[in-house]
Amino acid sequence: MREEEAHYDIAVIGGGLAGTCAAIAAARLGRRVALVNNRPVLGGNASSEIRVWVCGATAHGVQRWARETGIMGELYTENQYRNPEGNPYYWDQVVLDAVHAEPNIDLYLNTDVREVDASGPADSREVHSCTGWMMGSERRITFHARQFLDCTGDGLLGHLAGAHYRIGREARTEFDEPWAQSEADRSLLGSTILFHTKDTGRPVKFVPPAHAKDLSTTPILRNRILRTGDNGCDYWWIEWGGELDTVHDNERIRDELQSVIMGIWDHIKNSGQFPDAANLTLEWVGSLPGKREYRRFLGDYVLTQQDILQQHQFEDRIAFGGWSVDLHPVQGMYADGPGARQQYGDGIFHIPLRSLYSANVTNLHFAGRNISATHVAFGATRVMATCATLGEAAGTAAALCVAEGLTPRQLATERPELVRRTLLRQDASVIGIADEDPDNLARTARVTASSWLTRLAAEPAPDAPGAPYPLTRDLALLLPVDPALDTVDLLVHGAPDGRSRELTVELWGTGHPENAVPVDHLLTTTVTVPPDGPHWVTARLDHHPDTSRNAILVVRACTDTALVLLPVRTDGVLALRRKVEGDAAVDHDIPEEDGQLVVEWQARGLRRQSFAFRATPDTTAFHPERAVGGYQRPYGGPQMWSSGPEGDAEWLRLDWDDERELAEIRLVFDDDVDEYLNNLHRHRTPYEVMPELVRDYRVQSRDAAGAWHTLLTVTDNRRRHRVHTLEGADGGPVRTGALRLVVDATHGARRAHVIAFKAYGA
Ligand SMILES: Cc1cc2nc3c(=O)[nH]c(=O)nc-3n(C[C@H](O)[C@H](O)[C@H](O)COP(=O)(O)OP(=O)(O)OC[C@H]3O[C@@H](n4cnc5c(N)ncnc54)[C@H](O)[C@@H]3O)c2cc1C
């Protein structure tokens, strides 16, 4: 056995997606980081040991333009490229490679942290070190660090350090949350074990073990639907332990879950009710319960249900989510009602930095399922891509605390802009925050381009004539209004009975700029549609908002008429349709609540398509200036430069009045954050790389004589965010009065898109 002492700037305990992203974020900011995980595989509940699929703000496509960027975005897109079929072992390698790519991280797997050295009064504790036992290696390692992150999910590090936390559900009186209990209690979301089956190609038997549960003694057969084709996350409802202590009773919970899985499989194989299961066998059964909930630490702010549903715009927001408030009955699989209740706001929600550090431990951040949120709000923040963005934010904050000599509270309250600016510089996801980084010299440049897209339209072409889409329900188009929307022509099939129809067309605002649903009614007009057709008909809108914003053109249902649906993606535009009775729910096992605009107005099923339209006047939504000092993702408009429809080698250019010394550029390309990439379970995306992403490009500088010199050439790019060091002939920074980004090819899209072009001095 060995005793070891290890010294770091930052110790991240827990290697789920929150801890992994926290460690990567801190390491990229130059800090020496220990990443300590008590299991042999990174990824926590997402690992092949447990196999929960990574969901996030896109919420299976319910939310729009909501995929995470930053480190989670890199993991998603890398996984999509390497592993479009969602193999859980390939995913493990994607996560592991991302950690191995950071020379500043030392990874300690199989290392269970059980002891903490902390001191100070109860309201101002400080962690000095924590100690873990590396299983199989007989190494007892003490990690000394200036900042600690508890990303253990269960929150053992913080508990041992004396951090305040709670376990269980709040009383409604505390935060006035609509879904809170009348009395506080210690109930939780329960734990789950998943399993996978495979077809052996010939009949195979299953002899149940002695501990297999007789399902007829449970309410499961009455309340849950068993299907032979189900696998993995389809069985999320095999949940138990919400009325127990999900940590101290973990062994008992595992035994119960295992016995129910064997009982379910016995029922499927041997009850005679599933003849199509004859060839199926169990391929994999988890051996560790996936834990949903345990400690939730108390930070300087406790996130609530209202914050989620009303989309509270925190000054210190550092991440966002988009999952519904998703709570389960504490009885889990033995509950009589549905396995979950879910509710969305009108779009994504924001999370403040004050929910990511301890209110009473002066050098402790946390991220993941243990953040400072009520039980109800945790119902929305707990999905893993959201946990990952929280990890990136907490890791960034911890690194800045070390660099600036600040406590987490000082950083959050005195320097919140530093955290946001650093996150934006790294292309992390902070919604509605423009790049105001004074170090970004591009913000002082004139921005021009070879061309830019001015015409907002989707029109039939010989190879894409489109198809009638009946107006048996309300349909809509989300359009960027920049600066105005005078008219919209729609291509409409009239009635076959020889009579005209009056079409009601409305224009709606979206409320918050990040939303993509009709919230505020702006105007109504009517349009006459002649019979037969299709005909172009014109809706007069004369809409001139004070600031450029998306608006939603709603076409009300109208008998015997149809819009034309085209199989083309139109930049900055979304097609929507209103839910009608009989539409499939997002999750067939969960009833959908009424009055949720993101559920009522569906983008699902219409992505990368558009109703035929053409708008006037020309738009400036894709002006080259949108690529400098902008929001870095759709926010009230597309927020990017798009080249015009024609031309090779389109370019985007920065010009300064005097020469500048430039040492680094950062580029953000469009990888279509509307496409959701949750392929670790049943969702599949047809693209290994998003077609809009720039593939080949060059960066050039101009000399005093006006000649352009290529500084770097990139081919086969697969990354949204690229950082390049610029070197002049003397090895120092490049002196130039102009930079040019030349786009030689995309991964398939017709136009060049650039979301951000940034330049920094030495
Ligand atoms: C069955 C189930 C279904 C779910 N459904 C979904 C879903 O569909 N999509 C989705 O995105 N989310 C889902 N969730 C929620 C999600 O999995 C969790 O909220 C998320 O995993 C939390 O991430 P985390 O990084 O905070 O914690 P975890 O994923 O729990 O990771 C914590 C890590 O810390 C390690 N650790 C713990 N204690 C110590 C210690 N003392 N020392 C060292 N290491 C330690 C653990 O081994 C683990 O690797 C589900 C959860 C469960 C259980």
Image (spheres, rainbow, N blue to C red):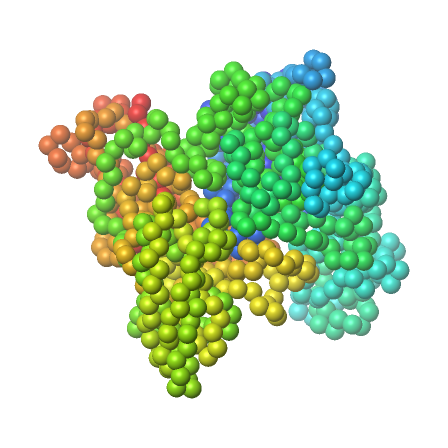
- Displayed quadrant of residue 398: top right
Q: Quadrant of residue 571?
A: bottom left
Q: Where, quadrant-wise, is the C terminus in this rendering?
A: top left
**In the rendering, at what x and y percent does residue 443 appear?**
30, 32
Determine whether 71 is above or below 360 in the image.
below
Towards the viewer: 660 or 479: 479
**Which residue is at a point 55% across and 56% down the rendered structure image?**
597
Q: Residue at x 49, y 17 (%)?
A: 404
Q: Residue furthest left?
A: 705
The residue at 34%/51% (across/down) is 544
- Specify whether 117 is left or right of 244: left
Q: Work out whether residue 753 or residue 585 is closer to the camera in this orientation and state it.
A: 585
Location of the N terminus by quadrant is top right
* Residue 653 at least partly seen: yes
- Identity of the residue furthest to the bottom in this view: 497
User: Is residue 40 visible in the rendered structure shown here?
Assistant: no
Image coordinates of residue 463 in percent, x first then y, are 32, 71
**Does residue 149 appear left or right of residue 526 in this picture?**
right
Q: Residue at x 57, y 68 (%)?
A: 580
